[in-house]
Amino acid sequence: MAERSQTASEAGNDNGTDEIIAGNVSKFAAVPVGYYGSPKKGHLIFDACFESGNLGRVDHVSEFEYDLFIRPDTCNPRFRVWFNFTVENVKESQRVIFNIVNFSKTKSLYRDGMTPMVKSTSRPKWQRLPPKNVYYYRCPDHRKNYVMSFAFCFDREDDIYQFAYCYPYTYTRFQHYLDSLQKRNMDYFFREQLGLSVQQRQLDLLTITNPEDKTDLENSVMQKKIKIPKLSLHPIEEEEEVRDYGEEEADFRHSKRQEGRRPSEPGAHKSIEAVVARLEKQNGLSLVGGAGPEELFADAPKGMDGLDEAVVPRALYEELLRSYQQQQEEMRHLQQELERTRRQLVQQAKKLKECGTLVSEMKELRDLNRRLQDVLLLRLGSGPAIELEKVKSESLEPEPEFQKTFSEEANTSSYYPAPAPVMDKYILENGKVHLGSGIWVDEERWHQLQVTQGDSKYTKNLAVMIWGTDVLKNRSVTGVATKKKKDAIPKPPLSPHKLSIVRECLYDRIAQETVDEAEIAQRLSKVNKYICEKIMDINKSCKNEERREAKYNLQ
């Protein structure tokens, strides 16, 4: 069983693991922790030491689950996408789940239906896994890296299975393809070596073009590489330029210049006259005897014919150079202003985001204030009714003394108690269960309640256990009359401390299922709704019973 080479741990690396993955696994057997000896049948053996292979580490999670870590790209440790490995030593009908736990991409085609490829020795054609067996998600157990999990069932023990990100295309296969193209001696295809990679592999430069345009293409490439010299007034500098760049390149430039020339036109004389006049005005130049602009070029080489072949005057060249430098300076100022504006926009965006957060907090505070006012009005306006109800139902349910503070009663509509161990909160004594605040329920009914499915049914049954149907049918959750009936009489509200007990019991139940605070708050906010539905159901069943009795009496 070959060992994987790994280096020391690196703090804060981006691989999502505690150590650097230095190489591919080679015939690595993933066995349970504490197992020693040769791998048995069903202990999967992973291998990625082949061309285009990538798998750096394998963790045995359980008999049916394995965590796989892929190596990053060369010279780019933050990019981890490609994987390609083989699995052998399987058992027939063995089902496994592979989790590739250190993907670096937030968006992947695996979310849109793409699935990994698989083949085996007896079935060498690549096939895709069913989309229903592939999942791509962000996992909190692996430093919130993206994880791709897929389930697979091995059906043949003697096969070697290979899994890949998509269809592999190796470097060797690509070189064979280029060799076959080069052997055809096609006129429009030209191959040359551009250099070597980090791993000393050949980098090819391919040119595909019309054979007639091949020379023009090379010339244009050469022209882009040539550094344009400064303009000169003396033919000696032109000769030095030829010596610097070589005779062939100088001939190439001169040939291009000859092809680009056009016959002189009268408009050219006028434009040059205007330029010379402006130069005279700015720099104090004067033309002796009213000489025309042609005399400025008298020192030009005699081999040139036509005004277009004359060398540019130094004064004009310097003016154009100053203009170019001014434009560069303006462009630099514009870029700095653009960068300053961009930073201001980023700061404004951050401020807008903070303002949005403050607005949402203000809305929450307004809602809490409104609830507080409703509860305060309820307490101030329903005191006598509550006392009357206590007198009527004293024999049915004993009311505990009022020990809650005003803040606890005001928070009855959105109560989120702190989690506590269930065994410490509920005390068993003489076949009764103490829920808190002097409320006792039957132990057998309490155990039956714990196996109830659904928050709605759990809340309704718990409300019946605490208040009883006779009390619930004459009460309401808020104590406010319904708006559906004009002559509706408001009923006394339910006891706030008992409502808090219901929420505490439901919170303990939900806390065992999830730790998401948003989900817990959302489920607890439906307690009043469930109790209202139960009260409506009780009243409806009472009315139906009264109708049946009336019908029976008539008969």
Image (spheres, rainbow, N blue to C red):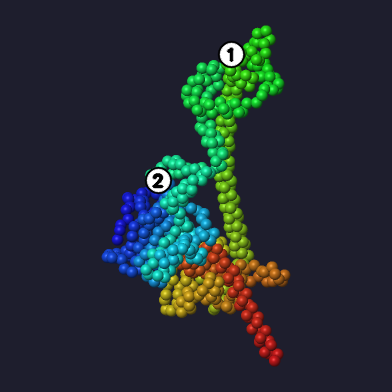
Residue type, numbered disc 2: Arg
Q: Which residue is mark 1?
A: 299
**Residue depicted at 52% across the width and 57% down the height:** 109
Q: Quadrant of residue 216?
A: top right
Residue 282 x/y as whole percent: 64, 15
Position above or below: 347 against 28: above
Identify the element where label 2 is drawn.
Answer: loop
Q: Indicate left or right for 489 with 518 as reference.
A: right
Q: Is 307 or 525 nearer to us in this picture?
A: 307
Residue 78 x/y as whole percent: 44, 48
* Mark 2 surroundings within 10 Å by alpha-carbon count, few (fewer than 14), some (14 through 19), many (20 or more): few
**Residue depicted at 49% across the width and 63% down the height:** 128
Q: Which of the image's four quarters has the C terminus? A: bottom right
- How far apart marks 1 and 2 lie (CA) works out to 58 Å
Identify the element where label 1 is drawn.
Answer: loop
Q: Is residue 134 visible?
A: no
Position above or below: 510 against 237: below
Q: Which residue is mark 2?
A: 201
Q: Is 141 or 452 nearer to us in this picture?
A: 141
**Residue depicted at 72% across the width and 70% down the height:** 486
View extreme (right): residue: 486
**Residue depicted at 41% across the width and 42% down the height:** 196
